[in-house]
Amino acid sequence: MHNIVRLLILSVAVAASTTVTAANIVWFDGHNPVGYIAHQSYSPVVKTAIGMLADDMKAVTGHRAEENHKGKIEIIELNSLTNKEFKKIQKRKLPYQKVIAKPEAFYIGVHDGRLIVMGDDARGTAYGIMELSRMAGVSPWIWWGDVVPERRKRLETDDHFSTLQRPSVTARGIAITGEDWFHHGQNTQKFFELMLRLRANTVYLPAKHQKSSAFAKECRKKAESFGFLVESRAQTSLFSWEDDSQWITTTQPGLIFHKAKKSYGKNTWIATVRNPKTAAYQLSLFLDMAWNQNNVKNGVEQHLEAWLKQQFGKESGHKLLPVMRKFYELTAVQKPELTGREFFSAHSFGNELERYLGEYSLIQRLTENIKKTVRPELRDAYFAAVEHPIQAAAAIAVKQLEAQESRHIARKESFHRDSEALGSAARSIKAWRKLQQLTQHYNEMAGGKWKRLIPTSLNNLPAFAEPILPDALSEAEIKKYGDDEDYEIQINSNGCIAKNAADFATATENAEIVPMLGCSMRAVALPKGETLTYQFRVPKYGKGILRISTVKTSAETPLFYVTIDNGEKKIYSPQEATVALWMGTHTLTIESLSDDLILDQWMIDNDPKRKFYRFPL
């Protein structure tokens, strides 16, 4: 993420007698606790951060960090120094000019044989202290994500190491929209500690919490102790990301990345999430970008991979990237909690129903295999962040779509003699039971810490209800017919012409491919006046239906021109239109009439009566 990755050396030498070069500053030598030098007084949030660092070092080294005049870490909060202390800083020629008068900035570097952590103010100093925890391998999700740090036998830093950090966005925060997740074993202290670790500084309390409730008073009191801002109304220069998921967070990383990237002129960023735990990655991405606009300069996929490695180790994180990428694709095709409202076809494009279930089955198997590479103490963390969302979303898909298939192919009078219908019904029931088991495990893991965080049902949505089948099945029938299906993953275009938006022949300068967005996972943001051009071949003359899929980013429907060959420019919104094409090569051009147009896929279907749900791509 920063130059920390390149410059920090965290040695895991087994032998205590390992020779240390003079160029390295050793924080932990395998025996003595990490020591830090403190000054006369600190702000409350800095004292809190020091306590968190002490606990983190216990988790990493087995010993709490301790105040020690021989310690290799020196913590300096410039705003709290006495005149005498400040003159000493000047005399030692420490680089205080790098951070002074720069709100929330911090500097970490090696001077006089020590690792100096220096902040301009209280929050900047606290963020710098938490950066030490990151450098030691502690995830910000140590408590909320149950991410147990890997034990280290040595902590050391190169003598030339330094980092200077300050925020890109002034106010960075989280909206508290409900009290529920404060009362499921979590508490306000741990929530504010998470905010500190994620370098947030603002709590947004909506109007409904502004009355004299004990909850609001507790939040305000705790925010003050952390030196955080408390806001109750939207600012004029505000970027707000609101998680629209009702169950597990499936917001595509590319959408957050795209919206955030366009919002760097706004001085307040607020994330609204159902609960922090189920939105762990999305919240990390949002606040990483708010802290430093260069944090995702190498792309959102690289950021996701780095986050997965931070939680689960390099090998596991690398293997998980394509799995999570496919998960975000499948949940973009259909949100798990809404599965069943729209129907996949078993007769279009090579059986799109089987293809969808087959893709879920594939990433389920990969998830199980990758789990073997994860440290045993990360079992709960892996389940919450990877296994549960993938397995539960897959269970809902199987439950709903196999029930749909059973109802479609069965006749009630012959249902119990129809092995195909019974197979679909039995798999649907087993998937529903698995969903209950997954929720139960979530409730029981980590000693019941997350009990009732994941609901067993939600707003009477069909996705969470017992499957609707032609008739009830006996346990014997479920056992006999409920073997897992080997779903086929295949695509047959059935003569349709289909392309992903990113597969253009030419594009104007400001068109931008956005990874991890849309069903294509490579949607194209097309500002007003910009164009994309595609070439395609028609095998024979015929009429077809042109369908263009976009990614919804606001309440307004984006408009655009569509031109085929040298024909008339026609204004389109995402809808169907009839086209007639001669055999041969053709050109399709799309010109944006909206600033928020994001194109995902398009197709020309030669069968206007075809029933389908997903483009054959």
Image (spheres, rainbow, N blue to C red):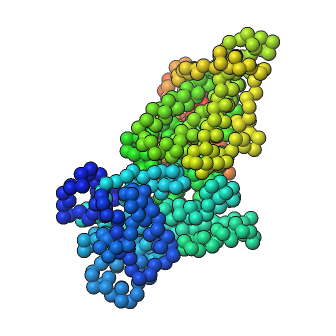
Quadrant housing residue 226: bottom right
Q: How many numbered marks have been drawn onto this rendered protein structure? A: 0
Q: Residue at x 50, y 30 (%)?
A: 365
The x, y position of residue 496, in whole percent, is: 57, 24
Outermost residue toward the bottom in this view? 83
**Image location (x, y in percent) of residue 142:** 49, 55
Does residue 549 appear anywhere in the picture?
no
Q: Quadrant of the N terminus?
A: bottom left
At horizontal 75% and vertical 72% (from top left) the residue drawn is: 212
For this rendering, which residue is in front, 519 or 36?
36
**268 relative position to 133: left or right:** right
Residue 311 located left or right of residue 109: right
Query: Quadrant location of residue 5?
Result: bottom left
Residue drawn at (68%, 51%) of the image: 555
Q: Is residue 353 visible?
A: yes
Position of residue 156 relative to residue 469, above or below, is below
Relative to the observer, which residue lies in front, 219 or 372? Answer: 372
Q: In this view, does 78 lie above or below 446?
A: below
Q: Position of residue 228 (x, y in %)?
A: 56, 71
Query: Which residue occupies the foreground of this view, 264 or 81?
Result: 81
Q: Residue 336, relative to residue 84: is it above or below?
A: above
Residue 371 image position (x, y, % from top left): 46, 37
Going 51% across and 65% down the picture, which residue do you hit?
196
Outermost right residue: 413
**Quadrant of residue 119 within the rendered picture:** bottom left
